[in-house]
Amino acid sequence: MSSPTTAAHPADPRTLRRVVGAGFLGTTIEYYDFFIYGTAAALVFPKVFFPELGAAAATTASFATFAVAFVARPFGGVVFGHLGDRAGRKATLVATLTIMGLSTVLIGALPSGHVIGAAAPVVLIALRFLQGLAVGGEWSTAALFVGEYAPDRKRGLYALAPTLGTSAGLLLSTVTFLITGVAMSTETFLSWGWRIPFLLSIVLVAVGLWVRLGVADTPVFLAAQAKAEAAAKAKLPLAELLRHQWKQMLLAAGAILMWQPFFTIGGVFLINYGTTEIGLSHTTMLTVNIVAIGFNIAGSVTGGKLADRIGRRRSMMTANGFGIVWAFALFPLADTGNPVLLGLGISATLFFVGTASSTMTAYMPELFRTAYRSTGTGAAFNLGSALGGAVPSIIAAPLIAAFGGTGVAVMLAAFALVATASIFFLSETRGDSLDEAATAIPRAAARHSD
């Protein structure tokens, strides 16, 4: 095991490269698994697992199973956050990757509703819940894993590793479905071809585990554990979080309520909308999504740089302000039926989603003390994800049916306003040392602690 390092003795460049690689590759694999479900929920699952329902009801049911993961994420955040604060960040990352991989492969092997009837969607929901538990611990732990290794003044830049891993996972899942769909007929794809992206996960997980097992736990965690091991084990991380920093947890959860809903609508729902409501082909929509993911990556890099240059709050405020306005342009562009304009709408959406999410990857771990940083980050991120991911997934289709795109626009703008207000009440943390949190509440926390 590596000896603890501190800000005075930063990790060597080779170690930092391995940490960045572990954060990027592991998150890529986790979110590949997570996003192939979203793509399948839009294109395949209504017909495969809900064959007895009408088209609209099947789509709603399919996206409801997609939303199950967001309900599970807060539980995963607490469970794996506790594991991260007690057993270490590395152990958590290995556990989440293993659970996600096994759940994904089992979904790929699950018989359809035509074969086992009502048991198919029940098992599907259970496996999706396990995916939600795993991803509930993944993003938050990967964010603080890289953040606790990164130099204080470059944490926004290093936080790009898990952020870009998320984008790469989405890109990989989309490309896999596109290739699979092009290589075979629609009938073959719906029969068994859709299972290939799920079954391929086993290979990716094996690679990800090999990378993550080769990296030591973070120096900040090891140093804190060495200094106060007895005291830390005598306390429950969740109880300490709720006692000292419950306000930060709620505000941090609210702060992600812009980019989670915008991502769900722009990156997942509009794939189904483009095929069922506008009449574009699956291939066209997947190609549009691939282009939009490129803009998401560009937005993530922009956000990481802005977070270090102008601060976390200003970067996120800028993205949120754009989101409030853009919410009312997205569906008018989609409803033109022009794939170029639809692509513009999704691309712009995912650009500022990337800007906000990459900033938050650096920001959120800085808000909590080391003793319960994993729990705090996991609880805050997944509470926000449950609301910002599950609610749009469930009500987007009914809103479209009742009010058209305007109903979804109002919903998105409302989420962005709540996120903006939450960030307003949080303090700036740019340049704060995470090592200080081992013995004292960071500056951002002290301003709002009881």
Image (cartoon, rainbow, N blue to C red):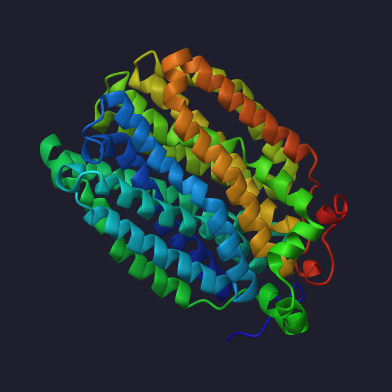
The answer to which of 167 and 386 lies nearer the viewer is 386
On the image, which quarter does residue 38 sit in? Answer: top left
Quarter of the figure that contains the C terminus? bottom right
Residue 328 located left or right of residue 367: left
Residue 405 located left or right of residue 275: right
On the image, which quarter does residue 14 sit in? Answer: bottom right
Residue at horizontal 49 percent and vertical 40 percent from the top? 296
Residue at horizontal 26 percent and vertical 52 percent from the top? 197
Report the number of numbered marks.
Answer: 0
Residue 5 shows in the view: no
Q: Position of residue 374 (x, y in %)?
A: 64, 63
Q: Is residue 182 above or below residue 405?
A: below
Q: Where is residue 251 in the image (x, y as percent from the top left)?
A: 73, 44
Residue 32 located left or right of residue 181: right
The answer to which of 52 and 299 lies nearer the viewer is 52
Residue at horizontal 44 percent and vertical 45 percent from the top? 68
Residue 403 shows in the view: yes
Q: Where is residue 255 in the image (x, y as percent from the top left)?
A: 68, 41
Residue 22 located left or right of residue 66: right
Quarter of the figure that contains the N terminus? bottom right
View extreme (front): residue? 118
Q: Position of residue 424 (x, y in %)?
A: 78, 37
